[in-house]
Every structure is written in C-alpha cells, then in structure tokens.
Image (tube, rainbow, N blue to C red):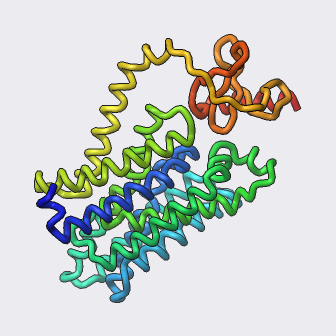
C-alpha cells in the first residue's frame, strides 16, 4: 500500500474512486426505490454523445457530457410526468438516441483522438489529473449535500408519488432534482468506471445494503460503505493484478454483494428468532394515527420513519426495514378503505 501512495497517479486515482464511491450510492438508492435502476445506463449513453461533441469541438468533454446528461435527465422526467409516453418508452428513446448520436459524432472525430473516447467509455482512472479531481470533488460535494438535505423528501416521492403529491410535496421539482443528480453522478463516474459501467456503482452497493439494512437510513450508510469498499478495493486490486480499473471495481462490487447475500442466507434463520425492540418514541400507533399499515402475519405493522413497528406488550417491536413494493400496495389499499 505504501508503494501505491508514493505514486501521484495512484493517489489521484484513489481520490477519484472515493468521490464516486461516496456519491453514486447516494443517488442510486432513490433510483432503486423508484424502480429506475437502469436509468444511469441511459444517461451514460447520452453523456457519450456529449463527450464526443467535446472532443470534436476541442471543448472540455466533462462539461459537454454534463450538459448532455442534465438535458437528457430533465427531458425524460418531463416526458414521464406530463407526456403520454411511459417512463420505459422515454428511457428507451433516450438510451438509443444517445447511442446513435454518439456513433454519428464519433465518426467525425479525428482518428488520433479516438483513444480519449475509449477512456470515457471504459474508464481511465489512472489518467485523472488534479484539474479532474477538483471538478469531481465539487460535483461530488453537491451530490452529498443535496441528497442529505432532501433525503426525506426524495424518499417520500420515491416510495409513493401520489401520496407525496397529496401531502403537498413538489413532486415534479424533486424528480427533476433527482434526474439532475443522476446526470452529475454519471459525469463524476465516467472517468472512473466508464460510461458503460456507471449504473453498476449506483445499483450494486444498494443491492448489497438491502441485504443487511433494517431502515432507509441504515441502508444509505451501508450503501456508501459498500460503494467506497468497491471503488477503493477495485483500484488497489487493479494495480496489483494489472487489470482494467473500471471493470475490476464493478467485479469487486459484485463479489461483495455475493458475500453479503450468502452471509444473509446463513444468518437469516437465527435472526428471525431474535426479538428486536424498536427505539422508544412518544407516539402511540393506532388505526387513526396517520402512519401507513402493513399486514404481517396475524397482526399489523406501522411504518414509522422508515421502520416497521409492531405493538408488543408495553413497547413496539422492530420487525423489518422499509416495506417491500407489495407491502406498500397493501398499505395504500388499507388507507383508501379507511378514507
């Protein structure tokens, strides 16, 4: 490890990997909640067109890719929210349109510059400069601050848009913010893992976190941990194994997910027998308390701040994490019946 830290290009690579490991899961957790796990791929292909424009016109590829990705994110969200096309159709149009535009523009790029495009496609983390680090650092800070400040609102919209709209939240504005954050994440990650693998760092750490987390907050922390471990571990592994850093980072992330999934399968029977007492709170749950309900065996759990609480004697038990999609459907049905 001392050898790695003594090399400037590896120090830059580790810093860039840390930025991506922190930022990507913070955005990806909301995409997972909204079932838009592959939206990062679509924006990545549009960003490819932006990179090609930057190389062709001798502009900063990072800047042009950011503009292209942000525009794509805004357009697809407006189409999904207000247009007749479904989200899947809008995503497909963006996905294939980005590929087509990228191919056409790349064909116009001088042959000596195509190596730059390859670095953006598959990642070129060891070529990260101090200037790149400054840009990535600022963009990552924006992602961290915005997702932290708007965490509860973004979670509410991701969980149930109709309920969030009825509660007075600006759903369209929040969705647009998430789309822009996704575009920024794509630009931050493209030099690290490449445009073709960007979505992996948004989704896989969150998939691993869901195996061990018991609340939305803990899922976020676990996802960031797995993201950092994958990014930094992948860079170090690629140095010693002499492999492509981007692909190695994703393989490490998949390996962590597999290990966590196996451990959960082994530990779950034991965990199911344990008795977890929910954190104390003065609120008393009941049929009219306003919190969503989730059927759970012979009783009902109450969803409270991302937790599922079940009355048990003089306290509440912690039964599970944020409800699954089918649980949310049952919850909405019960609320409609009461209203």
Quadrant of the rendered structure where residue 310 is? top right
Q: Position of residue 325 (x, y in %)?
A: 60, 33
Q: Position of residue 327 (x, y in %)?
A: 64, 28
Count of numbered labels shown in the rendering: 0
Up the image or down, 23 lies above or below 223; here it is below
Seen at 61% across and 63% down, the residue is 177
Seen at 76% across and 29% down, the residue is 333
Q: Position of residue 39 (x, y in %)?
A: 49, 55
In the image shown, does 112 or 89 lie closer to the viewer? 112
Asked if one can make out residue 160 in the rendered structure from this viewpoint, the answer is: yes
In the image shown, does 80 or 167 lie closer to the viewer? 167
In the image shown, does 244 or 301 lie closer to the viewer? 301
Q: Quadrant of the C terminus?
A: top right
Seen at 72% across and 30% down, the residue is 331
Asked if one can make out residue 124 in the rendered structure from this viewpoint, the answer is: no
Q: Position of residue 9 (x, y in %)?
A: 19, 70
């Amino acid at each position: 490890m001392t050898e790695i830290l003594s090399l400037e290009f590896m120090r830059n690579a580790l810093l860039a990997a840390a930025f991506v490991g922190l930022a990507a899961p913070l955005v990806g957790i909301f995409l997972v909640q909204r079932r838009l796990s592959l939206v990062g791929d679509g924006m990545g292909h549009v960003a490819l067109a932006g990179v090609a424009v930057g190389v062709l016109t001798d502009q900063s590829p990072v800047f042009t890719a950011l503009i292209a990705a942000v525009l794509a994110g805004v357009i697809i969200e407006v189409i999904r929210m207000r247009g007749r096309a479904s989200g899947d159709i809008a995503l497909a149009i963006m996905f294939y349109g980005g590929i087509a535009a990228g191919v056409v523009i790349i064909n116009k790029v001088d042959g000596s510059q195509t190596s730059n495009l390859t670095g953006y496609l598959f990642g070129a983390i060891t070529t990260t400069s101090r200037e790149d680090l400054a840009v990535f650092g600022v963009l990552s800070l924006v992602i961290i601050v915005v997702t932290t400040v708007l965490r509860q609102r973004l979670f509410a919209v991701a969980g149930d848009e109709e309920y969030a709209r009825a509660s007075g939240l600006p759903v369209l504005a929040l969705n647009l913010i998430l789309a822009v954050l996704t575009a920024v994440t794509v630009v931050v990650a493209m030099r690290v893992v490449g445009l073709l693998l960007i979505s992996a760092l948004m989704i896989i750490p969150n998939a691993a976190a869901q195996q061990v987390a018991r609340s939305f907050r803990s899922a976020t922390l676990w996802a960031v941990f797995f993201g950092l471990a994958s990014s930094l571990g992948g860079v170090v592994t690629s140095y010693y194994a002499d492999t492509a850093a981007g692909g190695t980072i994703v393989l490490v992330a998949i390996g962590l997910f597999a290990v966590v999934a196996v451990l959960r399968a082994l530990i779950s029977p034991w965990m199911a027998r344990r008795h977890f007492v929910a954190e104390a709170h003065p609120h008393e749950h009941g049929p009219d308390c306003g919190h969503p309900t989730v059927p759970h065996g012979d009783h009902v759990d109450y969803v409270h701040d991302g937790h599922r609480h079940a009355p048990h004697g003089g306290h509440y038990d912690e039964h599970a994490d944020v409800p699954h999609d089918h649980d949310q459907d049952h919850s909405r049905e019960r609320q409609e019946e009461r209203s």
